[in-house]
Image (cartoon, rainbow, N blue to C red):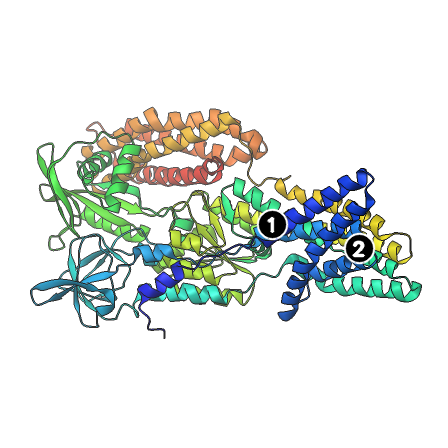
Amino acid sequence: MDRTPWSKELRRLGATVSRVPSLETLLLADTAVALTVGGIFRLAGATGPADLCWALGTVVAVVPAVGWVLEALRRGKAGVDLIAVLALGGTLAVREYLAGALIALMLATGRTLETAARRRASRDLRALLAHAPRTARRRTGTEVRTVPLAEVAVGDLLVVGPGEVVPVDGRAVGSAAELDESVLTGEPLTVRRPPGEPIRSGVVNAGGAFEVRATATAADSTYAEIVRLARRAGAESAPVVRLADRYAAWFLPLSVAAAGLAWLVSGSAVRAVAVLVVATPCPLLLAAPVAVVSGLSRASRLGVVVRDGGALENLGRARTLLLDKTGTLTVGRPRVIDVVAAPGWQPTQVLRLTASLDQYSPHVLARAVVDAARERGLRLSVPVDVAEEPGRGAVGTVAGRRMGVGRLDGRTGKPGWARAADNRAVLDGATVVWLTVDARPVGAVLLRDPLRHDAPRTLRRLRAAGIGRLVMLTGDRADPAREVGAVLGLDGVRSGLSPADKVDAVRAERGRAVTVMVGDGVNDAPALAAADIGVAMGACGSTASSEAADIVLTTDRVDRLADAVAIAVRSRRIAVQSALGGMLLSLAAMAAAAAGLLAPAVGALLQEGIDAAVILNALRALRDDRPDRPALTPSAESLIHRFAAEHDDLQDVLEAVRAAADQLSDSAGPASLAPVAEVHRLLTQRLLPHEHAEEHQLYPALAPTLGGPEATAPMSRAHAEIDRLAHRIATHLDLAGPDGSPTPEQLDDLRACLYGLHTVLRLHFVQEEENYFSLAP
């Protein structure tokens, strides 16, 4: 194993810069000038100077072209450039200088386009270097000294302060560590590591200061291994074989054989040169690169940056797609999914007080709680005497009462409603933030990294584009990963993976088919480099993953991945059409030239006509005749944004429905109907008007885009069911006994109505967000 200190290795890796040669650009300028100036002389009647200019343009192209051919032959390949060299040499030999100048220009144009489209980024991981610590704080007795990272030895006791990066692998000592491990696992939620548990280098201390006993040196730690993995995986990535070279494998010997046969039969070298001139594979030199560059241009307009044309070609052939979970299929940050209130409290009240206290906390969960409260339009209070205990939460005074948010003291027993909240968090794979008032728990906020609304539609489009296998690779736990896989209908789910495990999985899939890896974190960089095509979610992802990728999605929308695949497939198909069509026309011209019907100069002009036709066809890749994304009218787009915002605002209604059903199960007295009456008020005043507006405003606006009213009919049926259940709840309130209590025969049906309404609403909201709201940018 390489024992070089990993900070030095990072510097070497970060210093690697890919330089694009300018020879092709200079050649294009020279040949264009030579052809243009020669044309001016010919129009002026100066034949000699014209021929001289064209001959010079031809000679200028021959020299680098010979170099390219020799380099290809040294690697055991004979590409399209060999025919161009033979044609250039032949035109000089028989003094067909115009034909030579035309071929030189086409050769230079093709090489310039290809160079612009082919640039493959080096595995520049400067972001890893920026994240890596250079020193560590080592404690010896009562003395704490800062030492260079290379001096840390196994067994050293290190101090890690709040916000600092753990410098080497080790184990927590003395107190628990609250860690942000997203740089390694991609998971946004912090993790608590009790004393004695392993801690990996590269993670960030999200709590108070703690001590760690080093179990590895810097060179042997997890973070250094990520860098080495990325370096090795990038070196192992197979070079892209140009589309043009694949077709040249059979077109080249055929052209040479035809020219030789024409010379042998006729005895005329001019005929052989004429055959080579019309055989010059300009459809390969120009049409394929034009189609690819057009695809790159179209992709860039959609926020998809493709680093080279080879990556776009490969993406069009991909059949396996591997996806990270967090930040790719999920939003990548925690969101409030439910609020549970103790008897006598309301979910809205719990969320408002929790967010009021969390305003002063920098914790990722606190930000999510505050954002949820603001989205619902809740007015937050200003707390006083706020103090934060790292790893446990914050305490403060709100409205004259002492409150706390965070973890509950495990030594105190939990009431039944709190145990139910814990169970719900386990079932939902959620994290719980508790609210206590005067040291008594009164509510819980459940948070989870939710699925992206556009993820299901994106995966369906990917399958339609030809991706046959979809697999998720994640460092997350098995249960939440399996749930995401089941919802999305993935072909495979692999959870609990380290960066090295992801690289191994990518290598295994590459052995079966052209493989794409999609990720967004530093931990994904090695896997992105190991894949045939690496795709990074660059809008919110790490710089390291973006720089290790071949394709970067610059907008925070995973559906751009489906756009990229569709563009790649279409661009490659057009490139193949253009190349094959142009070569078939060239074969017909070769037959005419071999029969003596075409002089070299006329053949060159005919070849120009063929080139123009195939290039125009290749330019079709700039547009898409059958867009996958339905076009929305401005009014429909505005309605989508309006109702999406209302969904956020109505989350408290869904929570109230669930809470009323829970309370009805706990008690059947008069007090149990008070939450039901509140639910009826919320339904009547807020939710049902929202559903009515969707039915009569949003759905008619979307119907033309989606193909007619039948497309929204299932959602309309859900509206009818919501209305039916709301009316049934109102009827139960009317049937309550004279003392305000539900009669025994009402309880089962009323509970079923409330739980059923909650389920229907959640499913209905998710379906609308996935099928309709995801259409709007």
Element class at badge 1: helix
Q: Residue 284 vs residue 732: left or right?
A: right
Of residues 246 and 404, which is closer to you in this image?
A: 246
Q: Which residue matches tag 2?
A: 277
Of residues 226 and 429, which is closer to you in this image?
A: 226
Q: Residue 76 vs residue 490: left or right?
A: right
User: Residue at horizontal 49%, vertical 58%?
Assistant: 491
Which numbered dot is residue 25? 1
Q: Quadrant of the N terminus?
A: bottom left
For badge 1, the amino acid type reads Thr
Near mark 1 (Cα within 10 A), the count class, few <14, some 14-19 or many ≥20, is some
Which numbered dot is residue 357? none
> Number of callouts in the render?
2
User: Residue at horizontal 49%, vertical 67%?
Assistant: 236
CA separation, marks 1 and 2? 23 Å
In the rendering, at what x and y percent does residue 476 appear? 34, 58
Select label 1 or label 2 by which is in front. 1
Looking at the rendering, which quadrant does residue 202 occupy? bottom left
In the rendering, at what x and y percent does residue 584 appear? 79, 54
Would residue 37 be visible to someone looking at this image? yes
User: Residue at horizontal 41%, vertical 58%?
Assistant: 525
Of residues 648 and 716, which is closer to you in this image?
A: 648
Q: Residue 705 vs residue 178: left or right?
A: right
Q: Are marks 1 and 2 in contact (CB under 8 Å)?
A: no
Of residues 232 and 681, which is closer to you in this image?
A: 232
In the rendering, at what x and y percent does residue 559 appear? 49, 44
Instruction: Give the vertical position of 398 relative to 111 (above or below).
Output: above
For badge 2, the amino acid type reads Val
Q: Residue furthest left?
A: 142
Q: Earlier in the sequence, mark 1 or mark 2?
A: 1
Element class at badge 2: helix
